[in-house]
Amino acid sequence: MECFRIIGPTRIRGEVTASGAKNAALPALAASLLTEGALELSGLPAVRDIRTMRQLLAHLGVESEERGEVVRLQSRERARPDEAPYELVKTMRASILVLGPLVSRLGQARVSLPGGCAIGVRPIDQHLAGLEALGAEVHLEHGYVSARARRLTGAVFRFTQPTVTGTENLMMAGCLAKGTTVLENCAQEPEVRDLATLLGKMGARIQGAGSERIEIEGVETLTSASHRVIPDRIEIGTYLLAAAMTGGEILVRGAQSADLAPLLEKLTESGCELEVSNDGLQLHRPGELKPRDILTAPHPGFPTDLQAQYMAVMTQATGQATICETVFENRFQHVPELARMGADIQIQGAFAHVHGPTPLSGARVMATDLRASACLVLAGIAAAGETVVGRIYHLDRGYERMELKLQQLGARVERLPAEPTRAAATL
Ligand code: UD1
């Protein structure tokens, strides 16, 4: 299994360019199922989740072709099955995004249940209740969700809690439904807004995406469109945090500040200097890092996808920072690994109390999920000596060329084809 070997400590310094957002690209790809026309998408990051979604779409009869930076997708009418099999769905929960489009355009779908996930139970009850509200008959059998409807019909549906892919699934389903669909208590993430922009270009009539209430007036068909996905705010945040943690200086090209407001606020309060320009976001940490508490919450709250990386940074702040995770019930799996590197963190239910600053020392650690992997990489860059981060296949799901970007920023990180049998700091 591939791993990262990191020799630290190093200060992050330099420039890096933001990739397109994985979480915007996934629903944009799924939207190709909604039309016979061609979708031309650019800015798709070269990460494993995107390859998985393209494989799944190919299985569902969507032909895709790369022309330089643009991926052209075309769904072949009727020549496709309407089933998303377990082998493809099990590695990526976001596969559920094909359910809404398949039911609304083909009238039926059979999608494997995404299964368990390391960071929590993550049910899809809201996706299913929403489709039922639009008139679909939904059954669970043999680990699959089957949904059927001659044509979905617009309705009012209120999510019991905001769900990002749930909102995206139902927004796509509502586009081709008969009449008006009103979704309430929606996820307000920028990626939901980006999907609505794409659907709008395809001819959908959507209002309110990015707010708590979305109204969709169903249309008969959707057409071809071209779209560039937004930059990845989680990737951008990760690199800003790497610079903050190591007392460095960074320019993230292509970064937009509005979508990162909750993180930028905390970074400023903790002593970092930030500058927003046409080029992107610049961060510099001139002095000591101050501890600042965070509470993760749906957008515009502090993103749960940056919680682990932020925790790594707080190990270097002077004093105690409390981190409260409210979105997922089991998202502190990086804590024991950070502790192996010397961090002092106590967990009490949904709270983690981080006492800093603690000098970190390189160790062998294991990635448990996508964002926890990034947290361990940051810790490795700040730690003295050699760190080996195992199971980086988690990292490869969502970070494009991470080791190359970090090398460009001065970090001593390399990808090894297998975990070394003994420590050898020879980078
Ligand atoms: C998306 C992101 C993921 C991020 C998460 C929260 C994508 C592809 N992934 O995941 O990176 O960590 O948002 O910002 O965009 N829930 C239910 N019932 C449902 C659906 C969700 O109870 O039917 C719960 C979940 O268990 C979780 C919370 O709602 O506690 C939020 O989950 P959700 O927003 O759905 O996450 P995803 O869309 O899977």
Image: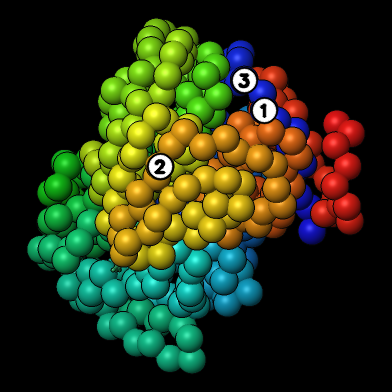
Q: Amino acid at mark 1?
A: Pro
Q: Residue at x 35, y 26 (%)?
A: 290
Dot 2: few (<14), some (14–19), or many (≥20) neighbours within 10 Å? many
Task: Give coordinates of residue 287: x percent, y percent.
Answer: 44, 14
The residue wearing badge 3 is 11
Q: Amino acid at mark 3?
A: Arg
Q: Amino acid at mark 2?
A: His
The residue wearing badge 2 is 355
Q: Are marks 2 and 3 in contact (CB under 8 Å)?
A: no
Q: Are marks 1 and 3 in contact (CB under 8 Å)?
A: yes
Dot 3: few (<14), some (14–19), or many (≥20) neighbours within 10 Å? some
Q: What is the secondary structure assignment of the residue under circle 2?
A: strand
Q: Residue at x 38, y 14 (%)?
A: 274
Q: How many marks can you see?
A: 3
Q: Tell me if residue 415 can be seen.
A: yes
Task: Give coordinates of residue 415: x percent, y percent.
Answer: 79, 41
Is 303 situated above or below 264? below
Is 20 situated above or below 331? above
Image check: 423 left or right of 141?
right
Q: CA distance from mark 1 to mark 3?
A: 7 Å
The residue wearing badge 1 is 9
Q: Quadrant of residue 314?
A: top left
Dot 1: few (<14), some (14–19), or many (≥20) neighbours within 10 Å? many
